[in-house]
Image (tube, rainbow, N blue to C red):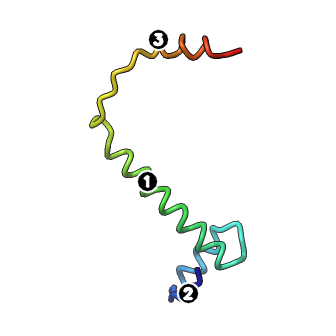
Amino acid sequence: MRTTINIPDEIMKELLSYSKTKSKTKAVSEALKDWIRMQKIKKLKSLRGKLKIEMDLEKQRAEDLKDLP
């Protein structure tokens, strides 16, 4: 998707200094991907202690070993 945005020069210079690429498009794309990833992690962390999982780990491991050739 082609989008026109205004990014302050100082922010773009700093982004490019941390980016492994010289392309502004790739740098912004990677920054957005990282931001989305961090938001997903943050959401998962907020679920800590709220999910109750009842599972017998030893039984599951034994069953998994049966399926191996």
Q: Nearer the viewer, residue 6 or 4?
A: 4
Residue furthest to the left in view is: 50
Measured from the top left, where is residue 7 in percent x and y? 51, 85
Tell me which label, 1 or 2, sits earlier in the chain: 2
43 to the left or right of 12: left
The alpha-carbon separation of the residues under discs 3 and 1 comes to 31 Å
The amino acid sitting under disc 2 is Asp
Foreground: disc 1 or disc 2: 1
What residue sits right under mark 1 in the picture? 40
What residue sits right under mark 3 in the picture? 59
Residue at 54% from the left image edge and 83% from the top image edge: 10
The alpha-carbon separation of the residues under discs 2 and 3 comes to 58 Å
Residue at 41% from the left image edge and 15% from the top image edge: 56
The alpha-carbon separation of the residues under discs 1 and 2 comes to 28 Å
Q: Nearer the viewer, residue 31 or 2?
A: 2
Q: Is residue 2 above or below residue 53?
A: below
The amino acid sitting under disc 3 is Lys
